[in-house]
Image (cartoon, rainbow, N blue to C red):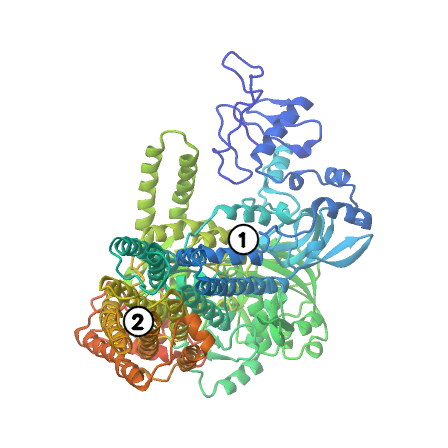
């Protein structure tokens, strides 16, 4: 640790203790082991030097601190908390303090005591939201609150039937929403249960498998290749140990581990007066610690568990997520605004009507014994109930729940109902490369020996495929008919066998077929056999390529015995092994004995690594099974082949060998010199076959896709061009690819300023100005970037916040612990099913298949859901507005109200609710993925819906008011229902019959109009009148229930209905089809005039259309080009047929497809 103004900082008056101890937190870079600049003095705290003294190193002097001073510095060090004390202590001290034995491990008693003290080795996620809380959360909607208010008033006024009906509606909606969200949480828990880590732990002197949650601090854990690390472990033994820490740091490359951290190496070297160059990597992680959630890719070792659960590095990062909030979904905001407006409008009208009625006496029932104010209050409640579409919350919940289930079937597990709709508003997808855009499985696609290139076919870890020679200029295309014959000759000659055998000898990875057990959302198990790889990803590709040639690792192991190994070094860029050759090689390893022809030496050194490093160490090479000198022009030719392969975004490795007479030469300086060059292997993490189509579909839908990867610029750009994210060969592509180093410091400065603003008591305005400048700078950079290279997890937060400031609805993908903050901060966080539990817990949606195409499918589902919601909102409100004006106009005319509260509730729930639910079941309309995303500022009702509501309200109001007046005239002898010649009972029955006419008329005309509401512009006849099966069920259900209520005496009294005669039924039947006819005629006008047509994401006035081949190969026209965006018509057709296309072979890329042209200035 380094301190400024320590107790021993020299004062201006001279040496001696100062008055106080101070330290700086803000001045660190965040990485342990970097010195902080002080005035004139550096203090190094070396805890492992001994429990009673610390060496303080000055430029010229050193001083030993006493115990009091030591404790003071330790206290301050704990406050700074840059390092892990147990990882930096002397191992002997750690063992003594914890009373541990590396030979026996913990005893059962120690395990129980430690488990009682530290608890289970689990991340303390928020406890599952109880069902009752999920239930109560459903009552936060403004419409639901309005219904509850209407319920309370109805019960207070003695309208028990209406009050009970409202209660049932609200309860049904709340239970449905809670059940759906609870089910999503249970599915995620089931997914996590399948991923419990098991570790080999030494206890009581015996190694036994222990499940991750049962591991305790102090456990001695034995780890090896392929293991997942179950806790934070201080290493005590290592052998060629490499770890993939991508889930923690975002870095895909494996990290070599040792027994000391970088700072320990530096201090030891300084104490010994040496200048050692140790290959350590301390940064976010320490060199001598394995971290929970990481994976061992190579080697083996053992260590002591120093942290479990929330004490681990993952636990500390998970703790940071609690403060990140993405806010409400667009739909929730829009429905909230709509509900608030409806509530204010209905309340205003109700108050107005109450005042008018009480002051003028209009609308009073002369046959009622209730006082005038009570009658007016009941009418006001009727208006409020009529204004609120009671079925809307239920329909929204059902619609989102259906979308949730549909997405689960498409491998997208949605954790929150509102997220379904938010996906439909997505304007940009920020996606990882590895495993999402690519398969996540390195695959060998090319092999090269001197002056001959070979193509390797097949995908992933499946060993099906062949190897045959190709011309460098025509590498891709269809697999030739004589490929099998050529493959046979390749096997016979054995040239490629030599190369792959050498690669295998210098690799530790394995690929075997294993039984994989998966569970669906109902808990049903499915078992299937899959190829599973363990070890370095590139080495796995070599194992698969060798297996295609019939070369098995088991045969290799029996024929060649490994004597020594020099692991891969980031400094040397290669690894090497010394092999003892079995004399009976040909017998033990059929098909690979030709390797013996290259040297008769009993020992062979094999080196594998970066092509330029291997080639420069080669003095000879193999040409047609003969060893010849490798001259400078030969090396140049080999490097040219490397450039040719690298330009296709391929990862290239070279291999060379050397014979030895004995096993005395084991150092890398011997094994990696004077090599015989054998050849090259080129592999790629292949693009998912469906990705190119999915990106094109997203573009057609106006959804931008940006790629975030840890790859270098050239590789990232090449992959982006291969998948259609960037136009191939476009000179502007370089401006669309950005190294994240450019925004990393800006992101750190933004975070720092935000913290200063939150903590500052004054001067906030200046901080805010600086923050605005930084925001604008970052936004300018991200606005024109399509590919982010060399990205780290925390860069994602900077990127997603920038897009949100620009008005985007951002979807962010991630799988690591450090991705979790970005997932929570995005509008839609998407975690990979294969990712960490922390990432899944922070996400709104989990991709069970990790595929980018699933995101695009989810966006389409979200758009469909939103479109269906707008349909039934339009349908419900047009009815409700007509009901409000019907009551208002009748009251102003001095008529009895045409509908009482219980009748309004019946209409809104049964008559309107059931068809509205059927509208939620509608399939996506053609062209829904050709429209641009809906702006966040766009209201849920656009001008076309508002116009339709106005037209329908006018006709429905006229028809229902006319039918009511006719009914009053027929049954009371007076158009206003007031006739002195009839007694009160006759008048009451006459009014009830007129009200019954209105109820039946509204029911029938709304049910018929539900068919025309299935589309705002498309005719119901072109869609197929009966194509929505659910609509038939809804109509039959609603008609049957209404007729049943109107003809059962007991229910007649409750709902104030009466029997009707033939004349009255004729009136109803005659009026019923008129609104539907008007609706269809209105659609004709809309289509003819283009009124209300949504803008397409890409213009269709095509001068030059992109062909199907263009879409399939990712040739997407750049927006800056003259004909940009005019490829839509043919693209749409090709995309609709894309789901039936076969998977394309990933080896069919030609050299002339290179996106990084080889040149003297660009050799790599």
Q: Is residue 1026 above or below residue 331?
A: below
Quadrant hosting residue 1055: bottom left
Q: Is residue 787 above or below residue 517?
A: above
Q: Is residue 953 above or below residue 672?
A: below
What residue did someone put label 2 on?
A: 930
Quadrant location of the C terminus?
Answer: bottom left
In the displayed structure, does residue 636 sit left or right of residue 971?
right
Whether residue 222 is visible to the viewer of this picture, yes or no, is yes
Tell me the SS state at disc 2: loop
Q: Nearer the viewer, residue 32 or 555?
A: 32
Q: Are marks 1 and 2 in contact (CB under 8 Å)?
A: no
Quadrant location of the N terminus?
Answer: top right
In the displayed structure, does residue 933 sit left or right of residue 66?
left
Residue 765, percent from left and from top? 33, 34
What residue did someone put label 1 on?
A: 817
**Mark 1 burial class by Cα count in 10 Å: few <14, some 14-19, many 20+:** many
In the displayed structure, does residue 209 sit left or right of residue 821?
right
Between marks 1 and 2, how big is the CA–CA gap? 36 Å
Residue 956, percent from left and from top? 26, 72
Q: Is residue 298 above or below residue 477?
A: above
Whether residue 1095 is visible to the viewer of this picture, yes or no, is no
Q: Nearer the viewer, residue 510 or 218?
A: 218
Question: Which label is found at residue 923?
Answer: none
Which mark is in front, 1 or 2?
2
Q: Nearer the viewer, residue 369 or 143?
A: 369
Tell me the SS state at disc 1: helix
Residue 71, percent from left and from top? 66, 26
In the displayed structure, does residue 994 sit left or right of residue 1046?
left
Quadrant hosting residue 667: bottom right
The residue sitting at the top extreme is: 13
Q: Nearer the viewer, residue 738 or 986?
A: 986
Residue at 44%, 53% in the rendered image: 791
């Amino acid at each position: 640790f380094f301190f400024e103004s320590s107790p021993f900082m020299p004062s201006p008056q001279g040496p001696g203790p100062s008055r106080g101890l101070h330290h700086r937190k803000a001045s660190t870079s965040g990485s342990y082991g970097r010195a902080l600049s002080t005035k004139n003095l550096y203090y190094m705290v070396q805890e492992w030097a001994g429990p009673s003294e610390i060496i303080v190193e000055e430029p010229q002097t050193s001083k030993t601190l006493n115990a009091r001073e030591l404790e003071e510095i330790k206290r301050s060090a704990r406050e700074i908390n840059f390092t892990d004390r147990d990882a930096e202590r002397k191992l002997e001290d750690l063992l003594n303090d914890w009373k541990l034995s590396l030979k026996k491990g913990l005893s059962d008693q120690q395990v129980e005591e430690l488990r009682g003290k530290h608890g289970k080795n689990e991340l303390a996620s928020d406890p599952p939201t109880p069902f009752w809380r999920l239930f109560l959360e459903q009552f936060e909607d403004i419409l639901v609150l309005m219904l509850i208010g209407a319920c309370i008033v109805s019960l207070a006024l003695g309208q028990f039937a209406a009050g009970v009906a409202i209660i049932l509606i609200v309860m049904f909606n709340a239970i449905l929403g809670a059940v759906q969200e609870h089910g999503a949480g249970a599915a995620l828990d089931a997914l996590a249960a399948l991923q419990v880590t098991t570790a080999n732990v030494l206890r009581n002197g015996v190694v036994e498998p222990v499940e991750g949650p049962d591991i305790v601090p102090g456990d001695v854990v034995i780890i090896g290749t392929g293991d997942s690390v179950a806790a934070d472990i201080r290493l005590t033994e290592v052998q060629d140990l490499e770890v993939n820490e991508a889930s923690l740091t975002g870095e895909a490359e494996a990290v070599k581990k040792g027994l000391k951290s970088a700072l320990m190496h530096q201090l030891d070297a300084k104490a010994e007066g040496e200048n050692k160059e140790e290959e350590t990597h301390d940064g976010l992680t320490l060199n001598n610690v394995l971290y929970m959630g990481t994976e061992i890719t190579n080697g083996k070792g053992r260590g002591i568990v120093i942290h479990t659960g929330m004490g681990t590095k993952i636990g500390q990062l998970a703790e940071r997520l609690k403060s990140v909030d993405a806010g409400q979904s667009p739909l929730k905001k829009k429905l909230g605004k709509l509900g608030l407006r409806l509530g204010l409008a209905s309340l205003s009208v109700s108050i107005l009507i109450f005042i008018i009625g009480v002051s003028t006496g209009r609308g009073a029932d002369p046959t009622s014994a209730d006082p005038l104010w009570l009658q007016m209050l009941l009418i006001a409640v009727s208006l409020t109930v009529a204004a609120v579409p009671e079925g809307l919350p239920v329909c929204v919940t059902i619609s989102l729940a259906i979308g949730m289930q549909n997405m689960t079937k498409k491998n997208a597990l949605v954790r929150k109902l509102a997220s379904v709709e938010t996906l439909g508003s997505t304007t940009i997808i920020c996606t990882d490369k590895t495993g999402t855009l690519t398969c996540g499985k390195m695959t060998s696609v090319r092999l090269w020996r001197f002056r001959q290139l070979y193509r390797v076919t097949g995908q992933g870890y499946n060993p099906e495929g062949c190897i045959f020679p190709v011309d460098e200029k025509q590498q891709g295309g269809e697999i030739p008919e004589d490929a099998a014959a050529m493959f046979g000759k390749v096997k016979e000659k054995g040239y490629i066998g030599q190369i792959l055998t050498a690669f295998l000898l210098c690799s530790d990875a394995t690929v075997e077929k294993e039984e994989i057990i998966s569970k669906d959302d109902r808990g049903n198990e499915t078992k299937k056999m899959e190829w599973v790889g363990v070890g370095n990803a590139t080495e796995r590709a070599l194992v698969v390529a060798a297996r295609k040639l019939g070369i098995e690792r088991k045969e290799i192991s029996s024929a060649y015995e490994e004597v020594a190994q020099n692991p891969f070094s980031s400094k040397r860029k290669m690894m090497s092994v010394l092999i003892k050759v079995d004399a009976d090689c040909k017998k033990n390893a059929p098909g690979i004995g030709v390797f013996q022809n290259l040297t008769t030496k009993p020992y062979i050194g094999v080196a594998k690594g970066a092509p330029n490093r291997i080639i420069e160490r080669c003095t000879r090479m193999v040409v047609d099974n003969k060893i010849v000198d490798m001259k400078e022009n030969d090396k140049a030719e080999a490097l040219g082949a490397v450039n040719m392969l690298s330009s296709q975004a391929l990862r290239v490795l070279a291999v060379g060998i050397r014979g030895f007479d004995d096993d005395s030469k084991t150092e890398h300086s011997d094994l990696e010199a004077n090599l015989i060059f054998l050849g090259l292997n080129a592999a790629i993490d292949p693009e998912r076959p469906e990705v190119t189509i999915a990106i094109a579909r997203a573009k057609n839908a106006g959804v931008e896709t940006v790629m975030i990867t840890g790859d270098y610029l050239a590789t990232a750009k090449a992959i982006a061009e291969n998948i259609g994210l960037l136009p191939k060969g476009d000179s502007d592509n370089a401006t669309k690819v950005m190294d994240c180093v450019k925004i990393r410091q800006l992101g750190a400065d933004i975070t720092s300023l935000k913290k200063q603003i939150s903590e500052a008591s004054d001067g906030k305005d200046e901080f805010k100005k600086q923050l605005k400048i930084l925001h604008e700078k970052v936004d300018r950079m991200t606005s024109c970037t399509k590919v982010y290279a060399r990205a780290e997890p925390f860069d994602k937060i900077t990127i997603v916040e920038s897009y949100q400031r620009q008005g985007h609805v951002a979807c962010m993908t991630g799988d690591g612990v450090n991705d979790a903050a970005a997932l929570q901060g995005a509008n839609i966080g998407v975690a990979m099913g294969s990712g960490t539990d922390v990432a899944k817990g922070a996400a709104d949606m989990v991709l069970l298949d990790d595929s980018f195409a699933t995101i695009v499918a989810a966006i389409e589902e979200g758009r469909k859901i939103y479109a269906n919601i707008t349909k039934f909102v339009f349908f419900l409100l047009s009815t409700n507005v007509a009901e409000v004006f019907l009551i208002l106009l009748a009251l102003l005319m001095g008529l009895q109200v045409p509908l009482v509260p219980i009748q309004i509730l019946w209409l809104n729930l049964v008559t309107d609710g059931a068809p509205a639910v059927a509208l939620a079941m509608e399939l996506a309309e053609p062209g829904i993925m050709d429209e641009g995303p809906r702006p966040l500022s766009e209201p849920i009702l656009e001008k076309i819906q508002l116009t339709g509501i106005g037209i329908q309200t006018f006709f429905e109001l006229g028809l229902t008011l006319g039918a009511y007046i006719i009914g009053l005239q027929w049954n009371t002898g007076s158009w206003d229902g007031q006739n002195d010649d009839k007694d009160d009972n006759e008048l009451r029955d006459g009014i009830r019959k007129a009200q019954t006419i209105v109820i039946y008329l509204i029911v029938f005309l709304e049910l018929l109009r539900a068919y025309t509401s299935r589309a705002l512009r498309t005719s119901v006849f072109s869609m197929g009148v009966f194509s929505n099966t659910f609509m038939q069920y809804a109509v039959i259900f609603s008609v049957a229930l209404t007729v049943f209520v109107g003809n059962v005496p007991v229910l007649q009294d409750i709902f104030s209905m009466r029997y009707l005669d033939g004349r009255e039924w004729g009136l109803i039947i005659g009026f019923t089809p008129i609104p539907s006819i008007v609706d269809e005629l209105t659609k004709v006008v809309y289509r003819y005039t283009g009124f209300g047509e949504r803008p397409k994401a890409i213009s269709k006035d095509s001068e030059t259309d992109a062909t199907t081949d263009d879409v399939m190969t990712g040739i997407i026209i750049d927006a800056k080009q003259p004909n940009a965006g005019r490829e839509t018509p043919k693209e749409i057709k090709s995309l609709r047929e894309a789901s039936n296309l076969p998977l394309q072979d990933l080896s069919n890329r030609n050299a002339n497809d290179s996106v990084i042209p080889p040149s003297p200035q660009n050799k790599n």
